[in-house]
Image (cartoon, rainbow, N blue to C red):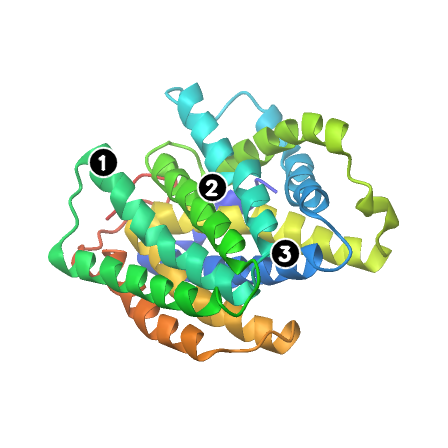
Amino acid sequence: MPAVTPFLRRSSFFLPSPWIGWLAALAAALIGSGWQLASRHGVTTTLGPVELAVLRYAIPALVLAPLWLRRSGWPAGLSLLRCALLVLCGGLPFGLVVLAGAQWAPAAHMGIFVAGSLPVFTALGGWLAAGDRPAPSRLLGLALIVAGMAVFGAADWRTVEGAWRGDLLFLFAALLWAVYTLAFRGCGLTPWQGAAVVNLGSALLLLPLVAVAGAPRLLSAPWADVAWQALGQGVVAGLLGLVVYSVAIARLGAARAALSAALVPLLTAAGGAGLLGEPFSGAWLAAVLLVVPGLVLGSGALAQPLRRQSASGTGRESA
């Protein structure tokens, strides 16, 4: 699997570095939306959050074993604190919070609240941690996002029983992912190394959880459900999703990488309606009309110059 990294490096001879970043951001949006739909389907049918978490993190941890067993090629300055932030905010806790929220709220809520609040928390974290005060246009975008989420929540909380519980969990998950985004920036890890750290750490955290709570539905669920979730959770989301999002951060910077979230509410709601039978609502349309433009402005991507990033893909900020 690490052999893919030289391929990414060679591809920069055919595509400019920003284009690789934009393609990675698009792939991250598609994978993120697909993971949300698969998670909603899984926790409302034959599997639970713990079972899905086992598939989500144990499979890529085993696939990436050759990477995390190697002692060479790792950045010398990588601190234990940063590793802990990557695992706790981009790994198992994040996944369990989203999966728990998916038991309460439909997929469209996941798309609005997770993707919508990500740039808000990323901007707040950049402001507090690095003094990166948002520009007026970015503040306007963040205000549109908050307004869209408020409109959506106020309408759907009255009609979807218990949805507010899921939405609050989605907001917390977005906060965790924003910390992961900021922690990965400048950490020195390649995308594959970052995925190895997150999945190995998450798999280790899973051991006491499974020892106490168990994962009985992995044995009782239909094998086809387990196989599809293993593919979607473990291979597509757990492995490829982290890698392409890390490539987007390395090539475009955290702000532009977060811009890919603008597609997620649309993709997730469309998939929820077409695949899961979840209805559209007027509140969702009103929220999208506020949140999607807000994501474009609030990410800050349009206000920052894009500089060509080296092809090493080490996670340094480029915007």
Q: Secondary structure at mark 1?
A: helix
Q: Residue at x 51, y 71 (%)?
A: 269
State how far apart marks 2 and 1 are (Cα): 26 Å
Q: Mark 2 or mark 1: which is in front?
A: 1
Residue lying furthest left? 136
Q: Secondary structure at mark 2?
A: helix
The picture places residue 51, in percent across and down from the top left corner, at 73, 44
The picture places residue 123, in percent across and down from the top left corner, at 26, 47
> Amino acid type of disc 3?
Ser
**Could you tell me if the residues under marks 2 and 3 are in contact, i.e. CB atoms within 8 Å?**
no
Residue 254: tell me if it is visible. no
The residue that disc 2 covers is: 191
How many residues crowd mark 3 within 10 Å: few (<14), some (14–19), many (20+)? Answer: many
Image quarter of residue 284: bottom left
Q: Quadrant of the N terminus?
A: top right
The residue that disc 3 covers is: 39
Q: Relative to the observer, which residue lies in front, 202 or 278?
A: 278
Q: Which mark is residue 128?
A: 1
Image quarter of residue 202: top right
How many residues crowd mark 2 within 10 Å: few (<14), some (14–19), many (20+)? Answer: many
State how far apart marks 2 and 3 are (Cα): 24 Å
The answer to which of marks 1 and 3 sits earlier in the sequence is 3
